[in-house]
Amino acid sequence: MAYAASVTLTHIGGRDHKLVIQESEAGAATEATITGLPNKGIVTAQLATKSSGTAATIAPILVTAAGSALAVQTVVQATASADQSNQADPPAQYHVENGTLYHRSVCNAGADNVITTVYLIRAGW
């Protein structure tokens, strides 16, 4: 089976958005494209859960360029783990011209991982 990701962006009121990414067959470098985001925003929280697969840990990141080796935009976790619950303090800012970011779960093993990641995003700075 091949990597697949479904991305749901929901406006939850005011400037706030909830981004849910559900991945199957995720691996170290698999990447989901997220469109429709505010061009400028802050990531206030990141939650991720690996429900099955070979990986022992994940370390999710958002980047501004596809295939980027650099975490141009990231919510940093203290340690990679099977579950993540991170609040950005201060919130992580991003700016993109086209409202597109790229998400990677950065699994430490396998290409068979099922992961759900949630980002809370506030439009503007």
Image (spheres, rainbow, N blue to C red):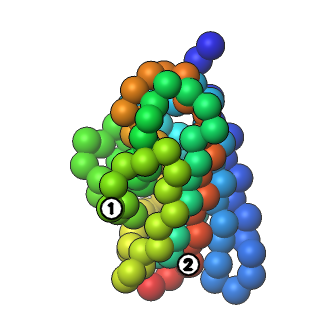
Q: Earlier in the sequence, mark 1 or mark 2?
A: 1
Label 2, secondary structure: give it.
strand
Label 1, secondary structure: give it.
loop
**Mark number, residue 8:** none
Q: What residue occupies the far left of the structure in this picture?
A: 70
Is 30 situated left or right of 16 in this image? left
When asked about the image quadrant of residue 123, the answer is bottom right
Q: Specify few, some or many for label 1: CA neighbours under 10 Å numbering under 14, 14-19, or 20 or more.
A: few
Q: Quadrant of the C terminus?
A: bottom left
Q: Nearer the viewer, residue 76 or 97?
A: 76
Is 72 situated left or right of 83 in this image? left
Residue at mark 1 to residue at mark 2: CA–CA distance: 25 Å
| Residue type, mark 1 in image | Ala
Q: Which residue is mark 1?
A: 78
| Residue type, mark 2 in image | Ala
Q: Specify few, some or many for label 2: CA neighbours under 10 Å numbering under 14, 14-19, or 20 or more.
A: some
For residue 120, above or below residue 48: below
Q: Nearer the viewer, residue 26 or 50?
A: 50
> Where does residue 82 sit, x and y in percent of width and height?
49, 45
Q: Nearer the viewer, residue 85 or 95?
A: 85
Q: Residue at x 63, y 83 (%)?
A: 15
> Where does residue 41 sit, x and y in percent of width and height?
48, 75
Closer to the eye: label 1 or 2 = 1
Q: Which residue is mark 2?
A: 123
> Where does residue 38 sit, x and y in percent of width and height?
56, 69
Answer yes or no: do the residues labelled 1 and 2 have beta carbons within 8 Å?
A: no
The answer to whether any part of residue 79 appears in the image is yes
Q: Quadrant of the N terminus?
A: top right
Q: Residue at x 44, y 22 (%)?
A: 110
Is 9 situated left or right of 113 in this image? right
> Where does residue 71 sit, x and y in percent of width and height?
30, 53
